[in-house]
Image (tube, helix red, strand yellow):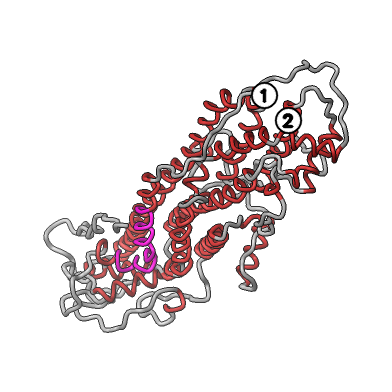
Amino acid sequence: MEEAKVPRLPQPALSYTQSNKVSIIEGEHLRICPQGYTCCTSEMEENLANRSRAELETALLDSSRTLQATLAAQLRSFDDHFQHLLNDSERALQDTFPSAFGELYTQNAKAFRDLYTELRLYYRGANLHLEDALAEFWARLLERLFRQLHPQLLLPDDYLDCLGKQAEPLRPFGDAPRELRLRATRAFVATRSFVQGLGVAGDVVRKVAQVPLGPECSRAVMKLLYCAHCLGVPGARPCPDYCRNVLKGCLANQADLDAEWRNLLDSMVLITDKFWGPAGAENVIGSVHLWLAEAINALQDNRDTLTAKVIQGCGNPKVNPHSPGSEEKRPRGKLALQEKPPAGVLEKLVSEAKAQLRDAQDFWISLPGTLCSEKMAMSASSDDRCWNGMAKGRYLPEVMGDGLANQINNPEVEVDITKPDMTIRQQIMQLKIMTNRLRSAYNGEDADFQDASDDGSSSSGSGDGCPEDICGRRVNKKSSSSRTTLTHALPGLSEREGQKTSATGCPQPCMALLVLLLILLLSVARPRWR
């Protein structure tokens, strides 16, 4: 990421004189600048102090805008790409399934639409368990399709309950549900976490850039920028090490973001490895409809065997006296899984994002040097001609380290290292939380559901994707509508910019998040989500 190029801070005009002559007076009244002979009154010194503080705060905002814009552009590009993949998959389903499967699709079109809606909601940050959503979809679809394949039979709810319990060993949809569950979970967790990471990073930069400067910093910046003018040496530019010490003291809290900021960006670069391969986001998200087609084909192929085993396990159902009689010849669709979806667009996005994220890693600790060299009219070298805070001459003190703890002996800014800025501490916490989510996502786990099963022993790997606690009862057709609250909505994007079907806004953090914040603050345990 290229550093922000903004104009240097303007040097103060000599507005305190009405002619070419400058009045020289005793400087006992000065409270910030050295009390020698001066051309600044108390009012002028106060005005220049206010001006210097405002100019530095503006410079900080300007320095962060390039990074904010870069992160926002990345977020929009990746979000558009992932949503485009899912939209294309749904569009392909709507275009091909009616002719491929006839009424098996058209009479259940809403179930397929609901599935895509839940996938979008999950990607956007909805508080739903993706594996459970898939399991409910397969259970609901099995009931509907089994009824359609056997219109001559009466299938009451208790019989369909038995069908659900038999589904796991029978694998009515073949391997498609299990494969989709494993691949979709990893793909959607990776993409959701990556895009959320971009949003969190942008929000942190924006909020930290708005943190006001303290009074001690304001005094030090005034002395750095304008006291040379008050003492009659306006041509003397600040010595490089002097400028760095002032800004290292002013931005001590910001520098403490460095460690967690690097951890976040490293985790974001790492998670992009999960975008490739058979289980990668590029392949899986754009191929959801193909897994669904494979599942329906398997159900049709296994129909006779499935029916016989269901009757063996659940008994002979009654004949429907109102059935049409002869069974309809149903169309059969054979939509092959595509081997290698086009990945050129995503490859370019990932390549650019990796380079920009790596360039941004030292953003916080490089701020003092960047501001001094580009915005503070700093002297090119430390010699007898630069301004050292007292006069023209060399600056002798050593440059302080980065961060709050290293400012205990800062000669230019009085910093209370026992009172960290709470806004910045909160942003450090947000970085830690997001890094934890990314690391979990890299392992294929949703940090919101750490106890979720990741093997094929249960859930949708059975063929219908329905664990005992779901299949053992009638599926609540309205259950999905109650799980659309966005607990981790994508920062930096409104819901209107993404999928219109998802809930708008981002609610307050849940109690689990508050507990996590407390745990992290006490440094007792590693962060863990519910």
Is residue 390 part of the magenta span, yes or no?
no
**Image position of 290 (left or right of 414):** right
Q: Is residue 257 left or right of residue 319?
A: left
Viewer-proximal residue among 416 and 309: 309
Closer to us: 138 or 356: 138
Three-letter residue code for mark 2: Arg
Question: Start and end of the magenta stretch?
Answer: 351-371
Q: Secondary structure at mark 1?
A: loop
**For this view, does 152 lie left or right of residue 279?**
right
In the rendered image of this protein, does residue 109 appear above or below residue 480?
Answer: above
Question: On screen, 356 above or below 306?
Answer: below
Residue with the mark numbered 1:
107
Please determine whether, in this image, residue 336 is positioned above or below residue 189: above
> Can residue 54 be spotted in the picture?
no
- Rendering coords of residue 474 (x, y %): 81, 38
The one nearer the camera, 284 or 262, is 284
Quadrant showing the C terminus? bottom right
Q: Is residue 369 magenta?
A: yes
For label 2, the residue is 144
In the rendered image of this protein, does residue 308 appear above or below residue 75?
Answer: above
Image coords of residue 360 (percent x, y): 37, 61
Q: Quadrant of the N terminus?
A: bottom left
Measuring from the top left, give residue 507's x and y in whole percent.
62, 46
Q: What distance separates the C-alpha of mark 1 from that of mark 2? A: 9 Å
The answer to the question of whether label 1 and label 2 lie on touching residues, with beta carbons closer than 8 A, is yes
Judge by depth and name the residue closer to the eye, 492 or 97.
97
Q: Is residue 90 visible?
A: yes
Write down the quadrant of residue 57 in the picture.
Answer: bottom left
Residue 134 found in image quarter: top right
